[in-house]
Image: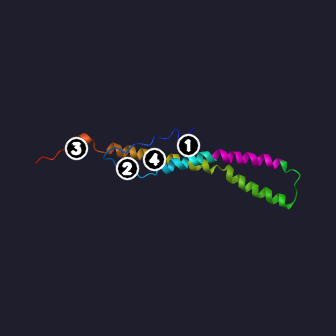
Amino acid sequence: MAWNDGCLPRPPIEEGARAVAFPWDDADALGAALAVARPAVTANLEARADTVALLSDWEGGHRREFDRERSEHEAVLSADELGSALATLRRAWDDAAELQAAANAQAPSPGDATTPTV
């Protein structure tokens, strides 16, 4: 499943239409990278949970410091900022596609051109 499944298709720029400024190729590359990273973060969180169980006999100040830092890291990872970034990117993609479709609709039709008379 691609990151932009369900998004509006990337519209062509019709002749005479204003091109909407949107970095389509960069957005596609970023979306693909974010989509690949999300399962890696999930796997990292699962591995951390499995590893903590192995540390049951570790006590003391270093363990408390470890647990505090691990909790902070896991809070950041489980917040799913990558998912939020993907949602924002998907909205921006759809907004740009809608703007381009509107610009295409306002473009003069090639048959509408009038030939000046002399």
Quadrant position of the N terminus in the picture: top right
Sequence-wise first label, 3 or 4: 4
Q: Which residues are magenta?
A: 38-53
The mark lying in front, picked from 4 and 2, is: 2
How far apart are the two marked residues, 1 and 2, measured between alpha carbons?
A: 24 Å
Q: Is residue 10 left or right of residue 32?
A: left
Q: Which residue is mark 2?
A: 19
Q: Residue furthest bottom?
A: 61
43 part of magenta stretch: yes
Where's residue 104, x and y in %? Answer: 35, 44
Circle 1 SS class: loop
Sequence-wise first label, 1 or 2: 1
Q: In the rendering, which numbered label is found on residue 3? A: 1
Sequence-wise first label, 4 or 1: 1
Three-letter amino acid code of the residue under disc 1: Trp
Sequence-wise first label, 4 or 2: 2
- Point 46% across, 51% down: residue: 23
Circle 2 SS class: loop
Circle 3 SS class: loop
Q: Is residue 84 left or right of residue 54?
A: left
Q: Residue furthest left?
A: 118
Say few, some or many: other residues with alpha carbon within 10 Å of mark 3 (under 14 / 14 to 19 / 20 or more): few
- Point 46% across, 48% down: residue: 24
Three-letter amino acid code of the residue under disc 2: Ala
Q: Which residue is mark 3?
A: 113
Three-letter amino acid code of the residue under disc 3: Ala
Where's residue 102, x and y in %? Answer: 37, 44
Sequence-wise first label, 2 or 3: 2
The mark lying in front, picked from 3 and 4, is: 3
Sequence-wise first label, 3 or 1: 1
Q: Which residue is mark 4?
A: 95
Q: Would you say the magenta stretch is mainly helix, strand or loop?
A: helix
